[in-house]
Image (cartoon, rainbow, N blue to C red):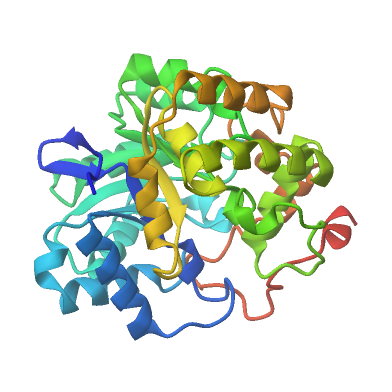
Amino acid sequence: MNIETITLGPGYTISRVAKGNWQLAARHGVPYDADAAIDDMRRFVEAGINAFDCADHYVGVEELIGRFRAKHPALARDLHVSTKYTPDLDLLPTLSKRNVEEAVDTSLKRLGVERLDLVQFHWWDYEIPGCTQALLWLQELQKAGKVAHIGTTNFDVAHLREIVGAGVKLLTNQLQYSLIDLRPERGMVEFCRGQGIHLFCYGTIAGGFISNRWLGQPDPPQPYANRSLVKYRLMVEEHGGWERFQDLLRQLDGIAHKHRTGISTIAARWVLDKPQVAVALVGAKDAKHLDETLDIFRVKLDAADREVLDALAASSPGAPGDCYAVERDPASIHKRIMQMNQNVHGAPTNMLMAPSLKELRG
């Protein structure tokens, strides 16, 4: 298998598909065996997937990757981990340089490294000033050798422009991009191309909804297994609802049969082929979908495939506005799914695994 890679900087060459690890976060879903999860990580790295993505607020995940690194030091030398710095919403008004450094030091300790490969910064509320200053402090830690590269997560074009204008050098912006979410095409791709910012794309298969599993199936009953599935079911709604989504799956299935693969492979490949996209993140709690993930590298979409897929995407471009706009809108159901204060104290013990759409709508 020829694993596609991309070199983002000196000594930073990674597979163009990354193992997303949000499903391993505490209180995210059904408990799992940590030793089995570490062994699954081994299988991914041995197969050539040397990019792992995580976050400081994915409770317990940085520690788990740190345990993997300690158990498999030879494989760890090939591994590059992108993490996120996501200060709690309640902390934003008083965020200090010390807070930023403490967060970086915590991630260093958890991951068992001397320098973080890539820190992707997130800011919950643009109405609270300070996000650019926090990135400038993060850049000071980069100059001190604690951070190799800086990126952002879920920022829009206006705020990226402000950040870059302040002198922050960004390597990446992580955002949602899929056949049912075209928000990056409303200015983000063009801006990032001009600034040399690479896109890390999550949600490429909408949490597993864009897959053979749901082809020809009725709208799944609630409650869902976790909050991420609620999030992506809302994106299906933005696409036009379950029946329209089924039409998309049927047409994807035709292209998948042509390439002797699955629907999710075609969907992820479509994103990976888009301008300025460096990496497609594929959420993987375990290695049962590893072969399917590797198939993304084998598939080569032709002009006819892309024409069909581009038309499918454009027929219903999904959520309105810039990247992550509806998720920040206080009046939006999309924001009500977010847990914005679980970094410092962890996931609340009384947190619902997956609130129903009816509950979210009030």
Residue 166 locus on image (x, y percent):
35, 23
Residues 74 and 110: in front is: 74
Residue 212 locus on image (x, y percent):
62, 54
Q: In this view, does 316 lie above or below 238?
A: above
Asked whether, in this view, residue 351 is left or right of residue 31, the answer is right
Quarter of the image where the C terminus is located: bottom right
Q: Quadrant of residue 37?
A: bottom left
Residues 7 and 158: in front is: 7
Asked whether, in this view, residue 294 is left or right of residue 180, the answer is left
Total of numbered circles in the picture?
A: 0
Residue 178 locus on image (x, y percent):
57, 37
Look at the image and tell me whether residue 54 can be seen: no
Residue 186 locus on image (x, y percent):
58, 19
Q: In this view, does 5 lie above or below 77?
A: above
Residues 21 and 326: in front is: 21
Q: Name the residue rendered at 78%, 48% in the picture.
A: 333
Q: Quadrant of residue 301?
A: top left
Residues 140 and 307: in front is: 307
Q: Name the residue rendered at 53%, 48% in the picture.
A: 264
Asked whether, in this view, residue 160 is left or right of residue 334, the answer is left
Q: Is residue 338 above or below residue 297?
A: below
Look at the image and tell me whether residue 185 can be seen: yes
Q: Quadrant of residue 213?
A: bottom right
